[in-house]
């Protein structure tokens, strides 16, 4: 049997210090230390606090991951790390740690794209052959539709948000509704008892002219304003109905455009990736609509949708197996790395 590579992945782009270990496409360890509680009172991630928390957490997280996977460092075949996009000070902690490890172990280093890593994590749970797919990538910092021709070499951006990311919209609306941070899970919970049809909130960029000019772009600023106006003008509003109706408006648009991208590209496979992929309504409605449109749907488990190290290890492992050129030790983090650049040279 072919030897499957043992790859360690380090993720420090935002507020999670996360380390995953995979053997080929099998997940062996996935350890996450989050600093989210330290940011909660500021209502968003504070970069300096995140960087300091990464410094404190990186070594214990690494040791825990090695222990969970029951391996020693010298067994590793490669080290993979998020090189961007993300907060530069936070990324630097991961990139310099990974460089040091790769140098000490004399093993290849892959500085990978955080967004492509989100998409690739699905391959740990759905062990199917690599084939072209459309990816709906919805996180706290990004919302885009991607055509993934080959996860190790070719991603094409079909469209993206013109303003807020989907997760950012969840976080902002949760804040004005006093539901806390991060807002996505809070709105998801609040919406369970609400009526998604209670309030008809706008669906951005879905007019007939938008379908001609911006079919795969998103805009959530009009929705945000509409919700804020509704809250101001309706002091005794029902929180659960607002949460459910707001969530429905976002999820509806995301899926309308994702299904359309599958149809127009002739690719009958959709992966949903990123933190918002953990949303229960998005998962349920995606299953319904993809079944109707005969699209094969894959969504990683909620824990693998939000930031983690397993996704970084997964992409590193796929790149190594595909014979991709490793990155240079001492590579620089790139806080605005475009999604098309899968790994740094
Ligand atoms: O991918 P991720 O963990 O970090 C980034 O790369 O940004 O995404 C975090 C985002 C946050 O905005 C959070 O509110 C959102 O994902 N999120 C959710 C849910 N869980 C996390 N949004 C909606 N519903 C959820 N259940
Ligand atoms: Zn992310």
Image: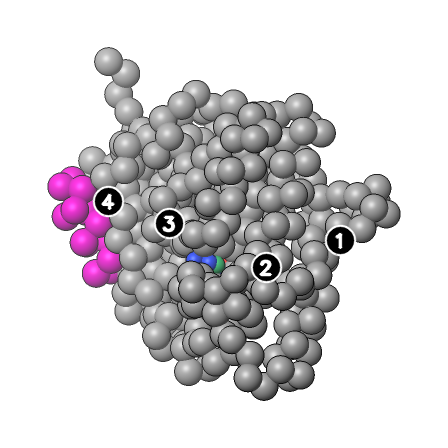
Q: Is disc 4's CB within 8 Å of ligand 1?
A: no
What's the distance in space between the residues labelled 2 and 4, CA to CA?
A: 41 Å
> Which secondary structure, mark 3?
helix
Q: Quadrant of residue 294?
A: top right
| Drawn side of residue 302 relative to residue 112, left or right | left
The residue tagged 3 is 302
Q: Quadrant of residue 279?
A: bottom left
Residue density around tag 2, few if under 14, some if 14–19, many if 20 or more, within 10 Å? some
The first of marks 2 and 4 along the sequence is: 4
- Give the percent coordinates (x, y) of residue 157: 67, 41
Q: Which residues are magenta?
A: 59-72
Could you say which disc has been placed on residue 205 in the image?
A: 1
Q: Is residue 65 magenta?
A: yes
**Which residue shows up at 46% across the image and 45% down it?**
284
The majority secondary structure of the magenta stretch comes to: helix
What's the distance in space between the residues labelled 2 and 3, CA to CA?
A: 25 Å
The residue tagged 4 is 29
**Which residue shows up at 50% across the image and 49% down it?**
282
Q: Is disc 3's CB within 8 Å of ligand 1?
A: yes
């Amino acid at each position: 049997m072919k030897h499957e590579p043992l790859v360690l992945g380090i993720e420090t782009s935002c507020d999670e210090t996360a380390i995953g270990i995979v053997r080929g496409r099998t997940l062996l360890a996935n350890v996450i230390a989050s600093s989210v509680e330290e940011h909660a009172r500021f209502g968003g991630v504070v970069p300096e606090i995140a960087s300091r928390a990464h410094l404190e957490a990186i070594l214990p997280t690494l040791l825990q991951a090695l222990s969970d996977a029951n391996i020693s460092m010298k067994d590793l075949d490669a080290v993979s790390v998020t090189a961007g996009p993300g907060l530069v000070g936070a990324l630097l902690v991961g990139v310099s740690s990974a460089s040091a490890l790769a140098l000490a172990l004399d093993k290849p280093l892959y500085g990978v794209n955080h967004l492509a890593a989100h998409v690739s994590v699905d391959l740990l749970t759905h062990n199917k052959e690599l084939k072209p797919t459309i990816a709906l990538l919805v996180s706290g910092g990004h919302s885009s539709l991607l055509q993934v021709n080959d996860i190790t070499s070719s991603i094409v951006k079909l469209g993206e948000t013109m303003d807020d990311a989907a997760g950012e919209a969840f976080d902002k609306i949760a804040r004005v509704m006093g539901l806390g941070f991060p807002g996505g899970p809070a709105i998801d919970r609040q919406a369970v008892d609400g009526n998604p049809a209670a309030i008809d909130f706008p669906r951005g960029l879905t007019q007939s002219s938008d379908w001609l000019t911006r079919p795969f772009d998103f805009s959530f600023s009009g929705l945000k304003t509409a919700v804020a106006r509704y809250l101001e003008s309706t002091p005794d509003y029902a929180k659960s109905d607002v949460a459910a109706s707001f969530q429905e408006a976002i999820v509806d648009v995301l899926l309308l455009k994702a299904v359309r991208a599958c149809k127009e590209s002739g690719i009958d496979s959709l992966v949903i990736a990123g933190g918002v992929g953990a949303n229960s309504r998005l998962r349920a409605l995606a299953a319904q609509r993809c079944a109707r449109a005969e699209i094969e749907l894959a969504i990683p488990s909620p824990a693998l949708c939000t930031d983690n190290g397993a996704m970084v290890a997964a992409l590193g492992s796929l790149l190594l197996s595909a014979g991709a050129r490793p990155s240079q030790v001492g590579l620089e983090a790139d806080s605005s790395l475009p999604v098309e650049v899968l790994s740094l040279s």
